[in-house]
Image (cartoon, rainbow, N blue to C red):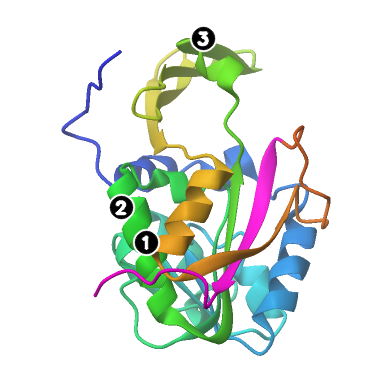
Amino acid sequence: MGRRESPDYDPATYGDRMAEVYDEWFGTPADAEEAVAFLGDLAGRGPALELGIGTGRVALPLAEKGIEVHGIDASEAMVERLRAKPGGDGVPASIGDFADVGVEGRFSLVYVVFNTFFALLTQEDQVRCFANVEKRLDDGGVFVVEAFVPDPERLAGGEVTQTKRVEVDRVFLETSRYDPVHQRVYSQNISMGETETKFYPVHIRYAWPSELDLMARLAGLRLRERFGGWRWDPFTASSQSHVSVYERGSSATPADG
């Protein structure tokens, strides 16, 4: 199954389309409090940097703990939502491709959550992100990645359509096409009503934990520990997601440049 790239889809597309409904649709994650506690412990005195900061669902409560938080996002629309929230103006957020990690300074914690790392659509961009994060970590700093573990059985199906919600005058669908050769998922979140239908596209390039570990080693990082969730759950063969903590390691091979 070959790739059929959309010339209209770029790093900002997801956020620009989704910003108006993002908080309404996704709300506060059930484990958000645990995520903030986990990240806060690793951040120490900070500062911390979130890649793909979005509307600040994690950055804002982390900042409320007294940690200086910075962010990067490709979507101005998402960052506008962040800035409109209480405390949002106090979180510096840069607009750009977060693979570049285009900010000044060094951080005790760099993190990317909610599968956002997979928004980088090529292996090259994902490797570049690891390498640029390494340059922004201070001594003892760590890089945290939260992402799903790919399910080969689901990916083998090729296409999946799900009904997410049904209301009296509106239905919400999610339809996805899987490209296992290139590790891509092309999805549409569709809101269909009596007078209006809207499309919210999502493209990702997924990677298995072992592939992420190799990217880290190429960047001069190594896996410190991996958990099955923010509650420090053990990571096992049945884990559907992982929280991976990377640190600088003398046994890793730094990337050139």
What whole-number distance in Å separates the C-alpha atoms at marks 1 and 3? Answer: 30 Å
Q: Which quadrant of the view contains residue 65?
A: bottom right
Residue most toward the left? 7
Q: Nearer the viewer, residue 178 or 135?
A: 135
Q: Which residues are magenta?
A: 240-257
Q: Is residue 243 magenta?
A: yes
Vertical side of 220 occupied by 188: above or below: above
Q: Nearer the viewer, residue 89 or 4?
A: 4
Vertical side of 176 occupied by 102: above or below: below
Name the side, left or right, on which 150 lies relative to 41: left
The residue drawn where x is 24% and y is 75% is: 257
Label 1: few (<14), some (14–19) or many (≥20) C-alpha neighbours in 10 Å: many
Q: Mark 3 = which residue?
A: 157
What whole-number distance in Å separates the C-alpha atoms at marks 2 and 1? Answer: 6 Å
Q: Mark 2 = which residue?
A: 125
Vertical side of 187 occupied by 157: above or below: above
Q: Mark 1 = which residue?
A: 129
Query: Hey, what amino acid is under mark 3?
Result: Gly
Q: Is residue 151 visible?
A: yes
Q: Position of residue 70 (x, y in %)?
A: 48, 77
Q: Are marks 2 and 1 in contact (CB under 8 Å)?
A: yes
Query: Hey, what amino acid is under mark 2?
Result: Asp
Q: How many numbered marks are there?
A: 3
Query: Hey, what amino acid is under mark 1?
Result: Cys
